[in-house]
Amino acid sequence: MAQRFRIDRRELIAGATVLAAVAAAGAGKAQEKPVQDKPVQDKPVQDKPIIDERTVLIVVDVQNDFCPGGSLAVAKGDEVVPVINTIAKRFSHVVLTQDWHTPGHASFASSHPGRKPFETIDMPYGPQVLWPDHCVQGTKGAEFHPGLDLPHAQTVIRKGYRREIDSYSGFVEADRRTPTGLTGYLRERGILRAVVVGLATDFCVNWTAQDAAKAGFETLVVEDACRAIDLDGSLAKAWADMAELDIQRITASDLPS
Ligand code: VGL
Ligand code: ZN
């Protein structure tokens, strides 16, 4: 269920109107209009989500290899950069994730003779999409996009650095049991709410947002601050799975200015 952020003031006014009418009727006065039992307007006001001292912005994998010219380029991936720079100014807590693979990583098609990028294979921990080599530790492709302007970011969670295990999520690796430490870091800092942005909507943003929600954080994804890979319907499935977990899908304009 989508969450309402604050009680609609017009509902309170409508409630007060009912009380006034009941009081008038009790005093024996003629009632000219029927008692109003509905809000004045049908459409409720959607107030802005809260960004406060207990809210973190998680910027997922805005790295050169996921942007145009990179080895696993997400279409228009670089377009998230100015959007993220703008909204990040409103957050006092910002963390980044960084895909950080070993050379010869098990998620690379090149590590599996006869396999091609974007095929799926079975790994000991479940199905794994095979990718072009990307975000290899210490390479240009693994660096953050140079336009990212987040001087107040407080930590970088690197992930996918074990050769045999991938990690789309910033919280838990693909074996679904190895934690990255991000849950403990955020809990210890008193964070209750996570706003997730970055690349790619249907993989690392999706898994990070789902794990944030499962860890008990109120979770929002800013759609226009993300871009997707969209492999065989993965984007539609990602939004459906996120909705199941009550993850709120918002746009940058929904955030307070
Ligand atoms: C990602 C595929 C492989 C992502 C990372 O950041 O969405 N996708 N590694
Ligand atoms: Zn990766």
Image (tube, rainbow, N blue to C red):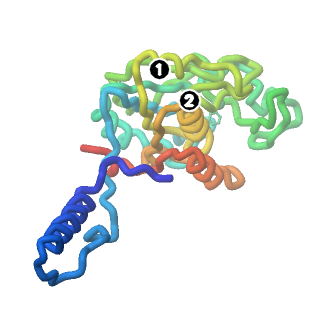
Q: Are marks 2 and 1 in contact (CB under 8 Å)?
A: yes
Residue 130, image x, y percentages: 76, 36
Foreground residue among 85 and 191: 191
Residue 79 visible in image: no
Outermost residue toward the right?
Answer: 114
**Local SS, label 2:** loop
Q: Place residue 101 in its image quadrant.
A: top right
Where is mark 2, residue-wise?
Answer: 215
Task: Tally the numbered discs.
Answer: 2
Q: Residues within 10 Å of mark 1 (few under 14, many from 20)?
A: some
Report the image quarter containing ligand 2. top right
Going from N to C along the chain, the mark reached first, 2 or 1, is 1
Mark 1 near ligand 1 (CB under 8 Å)?
no
Q: Where 17 falls versus 251 (above or below)?
A: below
Q: Where 233 falls versus 142 (above or below)?
A: below
Residue 70, image x, y percentages: 57, 36
Q: Residue at x 46, y 37 (%)?
A: 218
Residue 104, image x, y percentages: 75, 21
Foreground residue among 210 and 140: 210
Q: Residue at x 35, y 41 (%)?
A: 82
- 91 lies left or right of 172: left
- 44 lies left or right of 124: left
Q: Residue at x 24, y 62 (%)?
A: 15
Q: Which numbered marker is on residue 136? A: none
Where is mark 1, residue-wise?
Answer: 187
User: Which amino acid does the dot numbered 2 rest on?
Assistant: Ala
**Local SS, label 1:** helix
Q: Residues within 10 Å of mark 2 (few under 14, many from 20)?
A: some
